Amino acid sequence: MATYKKKGHKPSSKEEQQKNIEDQSTTAEVFNTLDEGAGKTEAWVASNQKYIFIIIGLAALLILGYLGYERFIQEPKEQEAANEMFQAQEYFDTALASTGAQSDSLYNMALTGGEGKYGFLDIIDDYGSTDAGNLANYYAGFAYLNTNRYQEAIDHLEDFDSDDEILAPLATIGIGDAFLQLDQPEEALNYYDKAASMRSNSFSTPKALLKGAITAIQVGDGDQAAEYLTRIEDEFSNTPEAEQVPVYLGRAQAMN
């Protein structure tokens, strides 16, 4: 049967009296320890109050400074950079639809500017910390690639930093293309492989896989080429790249 102590209950034995004394002593010790800890904390706060206020004040200033920078400096700069880049993008888009000397001229205007407007290189120099400045590296990289200036293309495409589903792998493919033109197929193959594994979509991934397969054949790696081509067949059978698989797959298999 469960038992309980009635109100006013007195210890009935020496053992119970001793236990009661020990319980009271332990409780008192705990509270004394807590009081001592609280006292030490209060004393530390009191003695370091000046420094605590300084730290809090600095933190508040940093937060307010960051918010002010974003609101009054960075946001207007982002908008200004986007506006300045509009003409360069127009030159670039027109160059894509052109050929020969006209195309080269338009790419150069996209890079260096024209009609008093900024080019991509100006945007990079003056607005490098903005999203537009970052995107300008992407456009500049492909403008250089399309005008056969491959090292400059590599430099700018490597400076482009993005998590975009399409642009990020396309920039990596572009670096591979530049290395291929510089007669460095092994390095190109590394970038095609990287681009193929960065994302999985029906636009950039089969491009990277096909370029990787062709380059793998070039360097004598038929197994790697067959692996890329088989992936196109299995995962991207409705893309234009899939139509070229039979030809290159035959070459890759013939190497074994």
Image: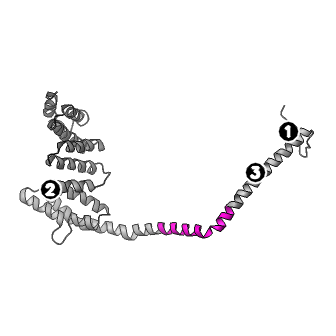
Q: Residue furthest left?
A: 101
Q: CA distance from mark 2 to mark 3?
A: 77 Å
Residues shaded magenta: 41-63
* Pointer 1 or 3: first along the chain: 1
* Pointer 1 or 2: first along the chain: 1
Q: Residues within 10 Å of mark 3 (few under 14, many from 20)?
A: few
- Which residue is labeled 1 in the image? 4
Amino acid type, callout 2: Arg
Q: Residue furthest bottom?
A: 116
The x, y position of residue 218, in whole percent, is 14, 38
Asked whether disc 1 touches disc 3, contact meaning CB atoms under 8 Å apart, the reply is no
The x, y position of residue 177, in whole percent, is 18, 47
- Which residue is labeled 3 in the image? 30
Amino acid type, callout 3: Val
Find residue 149 and name its label.
2
Asked whether disc 1 touches disc 2, contact meaning CB atoms under 8 Å apart, the reply is no
Q: Which of pointers 1 and 3 indicates the residue nearer the eye?
A: 3
Residue 149's quadrant in the figure?
Answer: bottom left
Element marked by disc 2: loop
At a point 23% along the width and 49% down the height, the residue shown is 170
43 in magenta: yes
* Left or right placement of residue 34 versus residue 115 in this view: right
Element marked by disc 3: helix
Q: Which of pointers 1 and 2 indicates the residue nearer the eye?
A: 2
Dominant SS of magenta comes to helix
In the rendered view, tell whether residue 70 sits above or below residue 35. below
Residue 141's quadrant in the figure?
Answer: bottom left
At a point 51% along the width and 66% down the height, the residue shown is 59
Q: CA distance from mark 1 to mark 2?
A: 93 Å
Amino acid type, callout 1: Tyr
Q: Residues within 10 Å of mark 1 (few under 14, many from 20)?
A: few
Query: Quadrant location of the N terminus?
Result: top right
